[in-house]
């Protein structure tokens, strides 16, 4: 079993530490870093360390994927009593990794602290040997064992194991949090899972640190993906793992990998057949406003109207991280910068602009929550004061809303909603109902309370673009954008350039952001400055194409 193999590896590591075995050192795939490798050295255990750690990695990698339903359905009684259910080896390993036996030795840590000379009055006066000792003790035992596995497993299986392990840790944290919501706090049987949940985030961050060092730019290999020269197995992964704009057909795939387009991916020597992150690029004559502009730009090259050398704008319209275990590792950042360099070398004279046409994920979900809370609070205040509310705008004129921004909807905007939905006494809810229909913008389908969907789209455009600009530039968490795509690009040094209404009319685009998309522009001369401003103060360069919709 996975847990049995891990315990054997753990005991072997501790045995080798006690005996101070000198292991031969060879260069690992990580350039410039020596990692101890045991090779095929055999000891009193009988099996070589390389064979043991390789078997462990392969066994773990062969475990079936675990769905949310299987996490929910398993027996908590067995979990809390320490019994292992069939097919539950993944969770057993997590318990071992985060258990007291493989964590920080707190007894040794307290002893090391006591050994600091009593005359030390400032942190800088602590002797270096005490600092080194404290650092050594503060490193969890599981981290040392993971490096032991990483350095000894054959064919760099340890790398694939760590990527898979981090994915499983992230899944466990997410699923346990969901399960915890229904737990009875007074039930002692739930304590074991709560302890595990409290320890998993530290394990996840340690794994991220290790993987960041392993997947740094100097190790990654950039490859262009083409329909005719790239292995079919890799193209298949590109097709099925596309997360932004799902493929519509084989012809769609060929277009994305053909003339007028570029697709690049990062690969790692330990995972040579797995594209870790890939990006799709369109060569255009100008910054696109809609997905149709991208399609039409490519068609103009295919029909011979223009050549690639006449295109002046490279547009990144989709970037996908294929490995959940590498989330938070800056692969996308490095990929975009590498692709910009490659395209500049391929088209040294004509490419002047680098930008994106990006979705605004979760905007519609955020907006729906705001509409509901806005409506509920206004009416709650009305009911509290026992007033007769003839017009919802009367409540809005009072600048004392507690849970929503008073500036989210102006009085004029609420009046406009009343005019757009004359048949409804609740214009905010009418807007909410309209947006639930992913076809509300189409002329051939009637929208609720609206005489004409075309008229509806035109009249809602200023309000929806204002709300999108608000979501991108005002709504934040810890001083950073709430939108994950916005946070990614501005952290890379891009600026918010322009909002585009109904730029993506696909069902997914309408569900996620009411069809609204945004251009982020990468000005090569300003990337570093924008990056530093954002990292130091959270400042974002916002152009008029976004800022103007806020009306400020």
Image (cartoon, grey):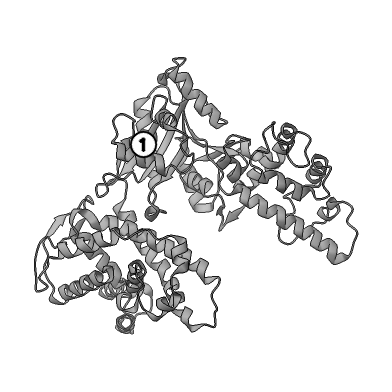
Q: Is residue 13 left or right of residue 300?
A: left
Residue 127 lies in what quarter of the image?
A: bottom left
SS label for mark 1: strand
Q: Nearer the viewer, residue 362 or 79?
A: 79
Name the residue at 72% across, 32% down: 454
Q: Nearer the viewer, residue 517 or 65?
A: 65
Where in the figure is residue 530, as x and y percent of width and height?
Answer: 49, 43
Q: Using a 10 Å C-alpha cutoff, classify the residue at mark 1 as few (fewer than 14 neighbours), some (14 to 19) or many (20 or more).
A: many
* Quadrant in which the C terminus appears: top right
Q: Is residue 327 visible?
A: yes
In the rendered view, tell whether residue 57 sits above or below residue 423: below
Where in the figure is residue 366, as x and y percent of width and height?
Answer: 63, 52
Where in the figure is residue 493, as x and y percent of width and height?
Answer: 47, 42
Name the residue at 51% across, 46% down: 485
* Quadrant in which the N terminus appears: bottom left
Give the residue number, with chain letter if any, for mark 1: 264
Where in the figure is residue 236, as x and y percent of width and height?
Answer: 35, 39
Name the residue at 35% across, 32% down: 342
């Amino acid at each position: 079993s996975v847990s049995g193999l891990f315990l054997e590896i753990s005991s072997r590591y501790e045995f080798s530490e006690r005996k101070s075995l000198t292991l031969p050192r060879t260069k690992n795939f990580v350039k410039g870093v020596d990692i101890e490798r045991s090779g095929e050295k055999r000891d009193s255990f009988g099996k070589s360390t390389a064979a043991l750690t390789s078997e462990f990695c392969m066994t773990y990698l062969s475990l079936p994927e675990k769905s949310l339903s299987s996490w929910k359905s398993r027996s908590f009684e067995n979990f809390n009593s320490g019994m292992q259910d069939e097919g539950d080896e993944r969770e057993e390993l997590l318990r071992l990794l985060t258990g007291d036996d493989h964590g920080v030795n707190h007894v040794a840590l307290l002893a090391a602290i006591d050994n600091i000379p009593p005359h030390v009055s400032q942190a800088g006066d602590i002797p270096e040997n005490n600092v080194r000792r404290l650092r050594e003790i503060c490193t969890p035992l599981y981290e040392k064992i993971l490096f032991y596995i990483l350095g000894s497993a054959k064919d760099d299986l340890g790398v694939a194991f760590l990527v898979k392990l981090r994915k499983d840790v992230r899944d466990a944290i997410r699923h346990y949090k969901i399960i915890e919501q229904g737990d009875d706090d007074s039930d002692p049987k739930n304590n074991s899972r709560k302890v595990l949940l409290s320890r998993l985030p530290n394990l996840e961050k340690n794994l991220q640190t290790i993987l960041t060092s392993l997947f740094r730019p100097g190790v990654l290999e950039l490859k262009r993906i083409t329909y005719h020269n790239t292995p079919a197995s890799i193209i298949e992964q590109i097709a099925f793992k596309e997360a932004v704009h799902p493929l519509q057909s084989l012809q769609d795939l060929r277009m994305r990998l053909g003339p007028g387009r570029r697709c690049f991916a990062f690969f790692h020597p330990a995972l040579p057949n797995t594209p870790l992150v890939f990006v799709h690029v369109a060569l255009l004559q100008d910054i696109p406003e809609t997905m149709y502009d991208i399609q039409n730009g490519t068609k103009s090259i295919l029909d011979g109207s223009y050549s690639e050398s006449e295109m002046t704008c490279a547009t990144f319209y989709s970037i996908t991280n294929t490995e959940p275990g590498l989330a938070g590792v800056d692969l996308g950042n490095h990929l975009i910068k590498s692709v910009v360099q490659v395209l500049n070398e391929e088209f040294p004279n004509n490419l002047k602009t680098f930008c994106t046409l990006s979705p605004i994920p979760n905007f519609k979900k955020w907006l729906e929550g705001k509409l509901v809370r806005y409506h509920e609070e206004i009416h709650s205040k009305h009911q509290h004061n026992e007033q007769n509310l003839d017009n919802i705008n009367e409540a809005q004129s009072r600048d004392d809303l507690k849970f929503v921004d008073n500036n989210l909807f102006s009085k004029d905007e609420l009046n406009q909603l009343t005019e757009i939905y004359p048949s409804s006494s609740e214009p905010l809810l009418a807007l909410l109902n309209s947006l639930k229909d992913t076809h509300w913008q189409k002329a051939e389908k009637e929208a609720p309370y609206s005489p004409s969907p075309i008229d509806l789209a035109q009249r809602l455009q200023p309000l929806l673009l204002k709300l999108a600009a608000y979501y991108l530039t005002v709504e934040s968490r810890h001083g950073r954008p709430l939108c994950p795509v916005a946070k990614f690009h501005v952290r890379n040094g891009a600026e918010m350039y322009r909002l585009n209404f109904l730029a993506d009319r696909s069902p997914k685009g309408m569900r996620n952001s009411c069809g609204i998309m945004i251009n982020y522009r990468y000005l090569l001369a300003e990337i570093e400055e924008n990056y530093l401003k954002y990292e130091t103060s959270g400042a974002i360069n916002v152009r008029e194409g976004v800022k103007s919709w806020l009306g400020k």
